[in-house]
Image: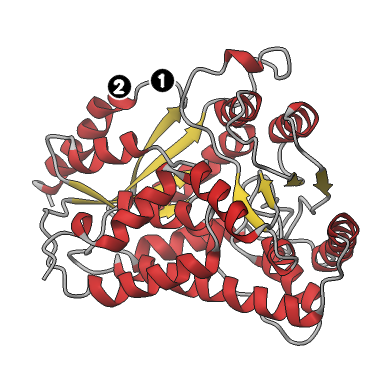
């Protein structure tokens, strides 16, 4: 019997996929002869690409200095945009045949256009308009119309039509991935969760950079075996991570393994966590409509979750509130990428909600090229203060 999740062959495979994602994509191309398309934002309908025999991979950075991007991006654009563009300019993504972005923030848009224009070997690029106000009742129809044009562009590029059966298979594969990833997060409701936030991050992000069908097989096996693993660490403070994309191994290791007080992430509400996979495609015959409605009505990004009076509610905040209760969250880490305007503008309202709930919270401003050790004292101070409060309850 395996005594540690880290020793499980499936977890080793997730980490290998994450750390060697470029090598995986290159080998996939050699093996299949297929095309690989990089996507910047998780609002890109991967099912359409997958139905065309294309491997969609998330464009990610590598936490290295990105001075090479200065001629293309303003200094006050977020580090994620600089880092991802730097990877392209340095040739890390030389295997990509195409790149795409669903309308997101202005920073990411500029990074995408520079990537599409300057990275060699890019045959196809597509900027996909996507509604900012996903709470608008017309957002689903708008998205479906744009997804139709997106599908036509993919078909024109590949020279092959995408059939309903192709879409059905892609929906089936992606829905299975979402169901399995949701089960991973459900495991963490337990009083003594079998996995940490680091494990969950590696599982989710690896799913964004490899063939979903292959990932599903390994993840299904992992879920069968992890039930037999006895947790070998103290859970401590149950933390929820909210904010920008975060795939920083060092940050997870610092907070979960490197502090004076034990702590464990039990939920990540970001686009490298639950926001990526929460919610299924309800395929009722009109495939593109079903796909569009899933992306519109999933848990939204702050750039999309605009509130306009009582009719247009903040769906994301409702989701966060439910998670805090169901996952028995003790405290929240708000991890915002430096200069990320959508998340930064969201923070005052988010803090107000957490204060009303009586939930401790700490705001950390992330910079991918800066060491994370500076956060240790602040996180430890929050946990220590929570312990002192418990003495008087």
Mark 1: few/some/many CA within 10 Å (<14, 14-19, 20+): few
Name the quadrant of the N terminus: bottom left
Determine which residue is flagged by label 2: 374
Residue 115 at x, y percent in the picture: 72, 31
Q: Quick check: can you spot residue 16?
A: yes
In percent of the image, x 87 and y 59: which residue is there? 146
Determine which residue is flagged by label 1: 370
Q: Is residue 196 left or right of residue 323?
A: left
Mark 2: few/some/many CA within 10 Å (<14, 14-19, 20+): few
Residue 77 at x, y percent in the picture: 64, 23
In front of the other: 136 or 177: 177
Q: Are marks 2 and 1 in contact (CB under 8 Å)?
A: yes
Can you say whether 122 is above or below 298 in the image? above
Q: Is residue 155 left or right of residue 76?
A: right
In front of the other: 267 or 324: 267
In percent of the image, x 60 and y 61: which residue is there? 315
Can you say whether 78 is above or below 298 in the image? above
Can you say whether 83 is above or below 173 in the image? above
């Amino acid at each position: 019997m395996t005594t540690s999740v880290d020793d499980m062959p499936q977890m080793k495979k997730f980490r290998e996929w994450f750390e060697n994602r470029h090598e995986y994509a290159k080998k996939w191309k050699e093996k299949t002869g297929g095309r690989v398309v990089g996507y910047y934002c998780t609002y890109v309908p991967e099912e359409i690409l997958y139905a065309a025999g294309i491997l969609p991979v998330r464009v990610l950075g590598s936490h290295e200095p990105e001075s090479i991007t200065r001629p293309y991006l303003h200094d006050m654009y977020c580090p994620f945009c600089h880092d991802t563009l730097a990877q392209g300019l340095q040739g890390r993504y030389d295997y990509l045949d195409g790149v795409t972005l669903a309308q997101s923030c202005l920073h990411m848009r500029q990074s995408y256009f520079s990537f599409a224009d300057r990275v060699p070997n890019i045959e196809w690029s597509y900027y996909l308009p996507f509604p900012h106000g996903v709470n608008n009742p017309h957002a689903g129809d708008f998205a479906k119309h744009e997804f139709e044009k997106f599908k036509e562009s993919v078909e024109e590029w590949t020279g092959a039509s995408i059939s309903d059966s192709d879409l059905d298979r892609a929906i089936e594969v992606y829905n299975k991935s979402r169901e399995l990833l949701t089960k991973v997060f459900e495991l963490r409701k337990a009083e003594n969760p079998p996995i940490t936030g680091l494990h969950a991050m590696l599982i989710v992000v690896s799913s964004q950079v490899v063939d979903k069908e292959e990932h599903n097989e390994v993840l299904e096996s992992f879920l069968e075996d992890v039930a037999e693993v006895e947790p070998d660490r103290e859970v401590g403070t149950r933390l929820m991570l909210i904010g920008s994309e975060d795939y920083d191994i060092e940050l997870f290791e610092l907070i979960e393994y490197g502090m004076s007080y034990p702590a464990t992430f039990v939920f990540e509400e970001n686009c490298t966590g639950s926001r990526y996979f929460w919610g299924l495609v309800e395929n009722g015959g009109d495939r593109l409509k079903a796909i569009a409605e899933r992306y519109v009505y999933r848990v939204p990004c702050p750039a999309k979750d605009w509130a306009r009076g009582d009719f247009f509610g903040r769906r994301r905040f409702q989701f966060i509130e439910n998670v805090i209760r169901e996952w028995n969250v003790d405290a929240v880490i708000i991890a915002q990428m430096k200069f990320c305007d959508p998340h930064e503008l969201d923070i005052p309202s988010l803090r107000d909600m957490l204060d009303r709930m009586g939930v401790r919270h700490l705001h950390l401003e992330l910079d991918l090229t800066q060491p994370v050790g500076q956060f240790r004292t602040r996180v430890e101070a929050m946990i220590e203060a929570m312990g002192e409060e418990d003495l008087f309850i």
